[in-house]
Amino acid sequence: MSLLPIRQSLQSPVRAVLRRTTQPCRSSVPSSTRAVARRGYADWRSSNTQDRTAVGVFTPTAAALFVATGAGLFVYFRHEKQQLLEKRQKEMESRSVGRPQVGGPFKLQTHDGRTLTDADLLGKWSFVYFGFSNCPDICPAELDKLTAVLSSLEKSHPTASLLPLFISVDPARDTPAQLRTYLADFHPSIVGLVGSYADTRAVCKAYRVYFSTPPDADPAGDYLVDHSIYVYLMDPRGQFVEAFGQSTEAADVIERVAREMDAYRAETGGLA
Ligand SMILES: [Cu+2]
């Protein structure tokens, strides 16, 4: 209560002094200049306000776009990765499913008078070759190659069961006795097989082998037989693994078969 009169008494002289000192100063600046100055500051201020929220390219819109793009790319690449994984999975499935359907049931006579069926292939690495004993050069060359392959594998994989088969595509002339004589020149483990014309045609169809022997061929006749030249490798499950053509060298066949045997052994733990 006692302060109020003092404040009032001080107030009026101070105001008077202030009025005196500020008034001439303000009037010395032209009104037009003041307006420009005020507008300039307002412009600067408003633009400065915009700039403060927009540092560089990072306007809120740009930031939102950046985040949206990032999220989009993330989703896109995750989708692509998923697609790639699915594609690989399908490839792996088709590799096992897409094995050529080579082989099938058969029942034939061996060169020493036994019956041999496709069931005899199980548990062994089989080499299935189709030919005929009157073949001038191709069959002897292929059987020489097979002999070299068998001799090598016997040494490198002594515990593996090997079953090489020579299936005749000339049932009219290739009797078991004829095959026994013929095969004596090659590896002793090669088994000669013969059957009726119908049996021969069926086994050739199962192994996708072409042969040109006519059904009514005259055993005394001088005819040549055209046939596919492949050595089919079948695994101990009786499944087709590979078809070795005429141009495949013995060393390449040995390497490939050995690789298959080692992989099979590692996979199954078996000795076959
Ligand atoms: Cu031949």
Image: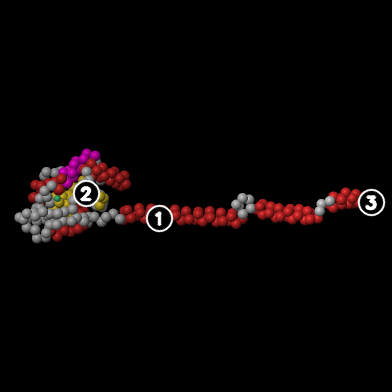
Amino acid type for the residue under numbered disc 2: Gly
Discs 3/2, front: 3
Do the residues bearing badges 3 and 2 touch, measured as CB atoms within 8 Å? Answer: no
User: In terms of sequence position, does the residue under pointer 1 or pointer 3 come before the other?
Assistant: 3
* Mark 1 burial class by Cα count in 10 Å: few <14, some 14-19, many 20+: few
CA gap between label 2 and label 1 equals 34 Å
Judge by depth and name the residue closer to the eye, 103 or 36.
Answer: 36
At horizontal 14% and vertical 54% (from top left) the residue drawn is 226
Q: Is residue 40 left or right of residue 229?
A: right
Residue linked to disc 1:
86
Residue linked to disc 2:
245
User: Percent from the top left, x then y, of residue 31?
Assistant: 81, 55
Q: Is residue 194 left or right of residue 100?
A: left
At horizontal 81% and vertical 53% (from top left) the residue drawn is 30
Judge by depth and name the residue closer to the eye, 251 or 149.
Answer: 251
Discs 1/3, front: 3
Q: Secondary structure at mark 2?
A: strand
* 93 in relation to 257, above or below: below
Q: Which residues are magenta?
A: 142-156
Asked whether residue 60 appears in the rendered view, the answer is yes
Q: Secondary structure at mark 3?
A: helix
Please identify the quarter of the rendering in which residue 205 is found: bottom left
Do the residues bearing badges 2 and 1 touch, measured as CB atoms within 8 Å? Answer: no
Residue linked to disc 3:
9
User: Percent from the top left, x then y, of residue 184?
Assistant: 11, 44
